[in-house]
Image (cartoon, rainbow, N blue to C red):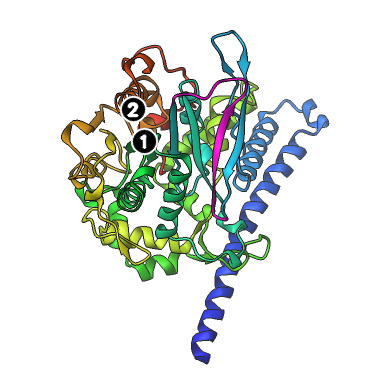
């Protein structure tokens, strides 16, 4: 026993040192950027006609901003919605259910009657905040009453709150859907797709009256073995012991969650950038030159995109490891063998929920075939209540927040929801057409968006 305690103590100290070392590197890089910006912007240097000072100052501004964003949770910043009466309706973000590891939040539109469509947007817990789906929320708000799962940064959650793994995540989804009621339309994006499917199955068996009306799964790894990607290959190559040794660390003393074992956000960000290092490098180089020339602006495309992309959060170790082991390695959802709190979850119990899957042909995170596998698992759902859509030329980010979502997929999802709403025909919203003018360009128009080079 003494040897075990000693080993755990050494491992914990090692993790804390590693975690604090990453934070030290980030903090030092931010300081170096600020120092370069301040020194190179000294007014006397303006008398020296040499571009080096402008370049160093530009490098400092970009570096300082980039490293500062990594520890700041972005605001939602949803713009006011123009109403039919010509008024601008302000959007308020209000928590309706508070939990230690995540809240259910509602985007209340001031002075507007509640919309007929009630949508629960299940955000992924995979390194970025739920605000990564800002443009998705903004595109749905004119037509829907929107709720979002807002997951918390694990480094800010005290160890006394206990663990949080995929079973706890599924339990949160069950509670959130039950709270919203039976007319809820669930849209799960990427990572939570298999767990949203499991949560729906639990409600179908235990509380049928609380089931959602529709379930839309977008680019999720329901069956990771259906189509290999770099993500699935990595998961299969690495053993669980290797993963735990390489990526799991203890939160440092600076944060409320000191001592909690996590997969650090900074480590995740490194892997995100490494997946497409050349494109990211070129984007930052262009930004530095634009800053030096004076052609860059505060709200330009680069800042809008990277202010969100660089903001990362820690993931609890048990959630990350259980996701890799049970979803990717053991294929518990894909083979309908998932268990929550000791009780088997039978996806075939879903019979009254309409199910739709959305995939992109260029998705290199959750390749086509991984998400549509959900339709075969839902053997109890009649064929006329199932729908699948494969978006040509769309990458991972594009199918829920890029141009493909705005012009094509969003209208199809809204039509799917309307088709299965329990309303008289006279009250049903009018049908939409893909590639119409109904979807405003609310998102970040960045080449990375539709290329699929964002890991969600």
Q: Secondary structure at mark 2?
A: loop
Q: Residue furthest bottom?
A: 2
Query: In this picture, is 171 found above or below 368?
Result: below
Marks 1 and 2, the one that precedes in the sequence: 2
Spatial separation of the CA atoms under disc 1 and disc 2: 35 Å
Query: What residue is shown at x 56% (from left), y 74% (from top)?
Result: 12
- Examine the rendering and report whether any part of residue 247 can be seen: no
Q: Please indicate, yes or no, whether residue 13 appears anywhere in the rendered image.
A: yes
Residue pointed to by mark 1: 452
Say which residue appears at 35% left-offset and 14% top-offset. 426
In this picture, which residue range is highlighted in magenta? 100-116
- Residue 385 relative to residue 105: left or right: left
Compared with 430, 348 (above or below) is: below
Frontmost residue, 364 versus 342:
342
Query: In the shown orientation, is residue 4 left or right of residue 393?
Result: right
In the image, residue 35 lies at what x, y percent? 73, 44
Mark linked to residue 422: 2
């Amino acid at each position: 026993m003494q040897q075990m305690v000693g080993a755990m103590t050494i491992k914990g100290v090692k993790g804390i040192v590693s975690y604090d070392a990453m934070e030290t590197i980030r903090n030092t890089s931010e300081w170096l950027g600020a120092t370069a910006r301040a020194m190179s912007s000294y007014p006397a240097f303006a008398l020296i006609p040499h571009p080096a000072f402008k370049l160093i100052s530009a490098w400092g501004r970009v570096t300082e901003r980039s490293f500062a964003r990594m520890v700041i949770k972005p605001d939602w910043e949803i713009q006011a919605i123009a109403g039919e009466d010509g008024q601008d309706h302000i959007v308020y973000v209000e928590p309706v259910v508070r939990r230690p590891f995540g809240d259910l939040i509602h985007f209340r539109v001031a002075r507007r009657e509640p919309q007929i469509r009630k949508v629960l947007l299940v955000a992924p817990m995979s390194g970025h905040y739920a605000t990564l789906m800002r443009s998705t929320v903004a595109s749905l708000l004119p037509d829907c009453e929107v709720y979002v799962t807002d997951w918390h940064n694990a480094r800010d959650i005290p160890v006394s709150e206990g663990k949080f793994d995929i079973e706890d995540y599924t339990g949160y989804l069950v509670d959130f859907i039950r709270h919203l009621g039976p007319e809820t339309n669930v849209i799960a994006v990427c990572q939570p797709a298999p767990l949203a499917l499991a949560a729906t199955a639990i409600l179908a068996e235990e509380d049928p009256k609380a089931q959602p009306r529709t379930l839309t799964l977008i680019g999720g790894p329901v069956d990771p073995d259906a189509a290999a990607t770099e993500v699935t290959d990595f998961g299969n190559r690495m053993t669980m012991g290797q993963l735990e040794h390489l990526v799991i660390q203890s939160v440092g003393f600076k944060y409320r969650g000191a001592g909690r074992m996590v997969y650090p956000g900074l480590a995740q960000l490194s892997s995100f950038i490494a997946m497409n290092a050349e494109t990211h490098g070129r984007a930052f180089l262009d930004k530095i030159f634009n800053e030096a020339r004076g052609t860059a602006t505060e709200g330009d495309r680069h800042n809008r995109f990277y202010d969100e992309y660089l903001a990362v959060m820690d993931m609890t170790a048990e959630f990350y490891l259980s996701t890799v082991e049970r979803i990717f390695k053991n294929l518990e959802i894909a083979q309908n063998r998932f268990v929550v709190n000791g009780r088997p979850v039978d996806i075939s119990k879903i019979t009254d929920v309409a199910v739709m899957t959305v995939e992109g042909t260029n998705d290199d995170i959750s390749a086509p075939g991984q998400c549509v596998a959900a339709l075969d698992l839902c053997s109890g759902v009649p064929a006329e209540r199932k729908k699948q859509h494969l978006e040509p030329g769309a990458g991972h980010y594009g199918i829920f927040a890029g141009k493909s979502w705005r012009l094509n997929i969003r209208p199809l999802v809204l039509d799917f929801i309307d088709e299965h709403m329990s309303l008289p025909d006279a009250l049903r919203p009018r049908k939409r057409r893909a590639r119409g003018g109904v979807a405003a360009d609310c998102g970040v128009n960045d080449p990375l968006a539709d290329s699929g080079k964002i890991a969600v």
